[in-house]
Image: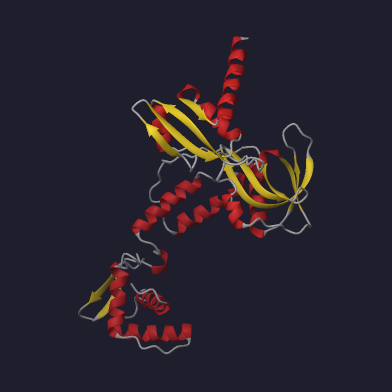
Amino acid sequence: MPTNKHAIIRYRTIDRCLRKINQQWTWRELVEECEKEIFRSTGKEVTVSERTIKYDIAAMRSDKGLGYYAPIEYDRKEKSYYYSDLSYKLTESPINQTDQEILQNAISLLGQFTEVAEVTGIQSILTKLESRLDLKKERFEPVIQFDQQHEASGQNWLNQLYQSIKKRKPLNILYQAFDKKAASRIISPQLLKEYSGRWYLLAFDHRRKETRVFGLDRIKEIKESLAAYHPIENRIAKKYFDQVVGVSVLKERKAQKVRFEAYGNQMHYFNTKPLHSSQRLISQTKKKAVFEIEVIVNYELKSELLSFQDSIKVLSPKSLQQEFVQILDAMKSNYSG
């Protein structure tokens, strides 16, 4: 399928000519018009052959890649080409039926985010797309539902932080960590991450001179800063969360191998949905399986493992196993009391 600039000019010229119903268009007349338009658009004198024009017409009619499906007919008596559908216009059919279905599905997915404050502008874009591409012929109920909270605390900062990352602009934020007073921080935002229904920001903390993670729900205020932007190397930012489950990266700790045993149906759950990208199967029987991951032990990992209750057992490291025993004893004490 020709995709060069001259081919596109020829397609548009043939379309423009065939929409002029008060004139007959033989291949010679189409050649002449295409040569004129190419010279007018590019300043180059190009010879267009009969074969080229007929190839173009065939492509406009049925080439799946182009997706024009132009209703071009040939009048043998007049030896001229014409549109059988006078309402057809090439520029109003830029994609084929398959592409339209794919785009309609994408629009349906995007439409689920229109309630989020930061992307309310997307509704007008979707409306324009549907109108322009005539995608409102059929309306479907959503068949995919996302686990998202439109009113999640801190989500109102998303757009401002996103723009700051894109434009590489530092910010002065008022941040209140749990059980602490709110304090001003100058940061250089680098990466936004969503985990378990909450949003987090990876940024360089100018005062502490280190990379830190900030929960958006704990940001009370954001202002622009005159400080110089301090970038974090892309390779560091992309791999920052690689060694953890969740978002808590404890720099004083190193990754270690955590081995656990899963029972019954739970072992199938871990086989199909690994707890971490490093997870590997150590052994498996009909009743249980042993898995191992290599991570930094943090709060989120403990919470995940504890959520499976009596379906799993931590085997190593011993320190984590003992900590779980203490937690379970405390829980038992709370209920017995």
Q: Position of residue 68 (x, y in %)?
A: 35, 66
Q: Viewer-proximal residue, 321 or 171? A: 321
Q: Position of residue 154 (x, y in %)?
A: 66, 40
Residue 25 in view in this figure:
no
- The answer to whether residue 309 is above or below residue 120 is above
| Image position of 102 (left or right of 112) | left
Q: Quadrant of residue 33?
A: bottom left
| Image position of 189 (left or right of 255) | right
Q: Residue furthest front?
A: 318
Q: Quadrant of residue 331?
A: top right
**In which quadrant will I find the C terminus?**
top right
Q: Quadrant of residue 64?
A: bottom left
Which residue shows up at 23% across the image and 81% down it?
A: 78
- The answer to whether residue 235 is above or below residue 9 is above
- The answer to whether residue 228 is above or below residue 283 is below
Which residue shows up at 35% across the image and 29% down it?
A: 285
Q: Viewer-proximal residue, 243 or 237? A: 243
Q: Position of residue 277 (x, y in %)?
A: 48, 43
Which residue shows up at 64% across the image and 47% down it?
A: 158
**In which quadrant will I find the N terminus?**
bottom left
Residue 158 in view in this figure:
yes
| Image position of 247 (left or right of 291) | right
Q: Residue furthest left?
A: 77
Which residue shows up at 47% across the image and 82% down it?
A: 41
Q: How is the image coloured?
A: secondary structure
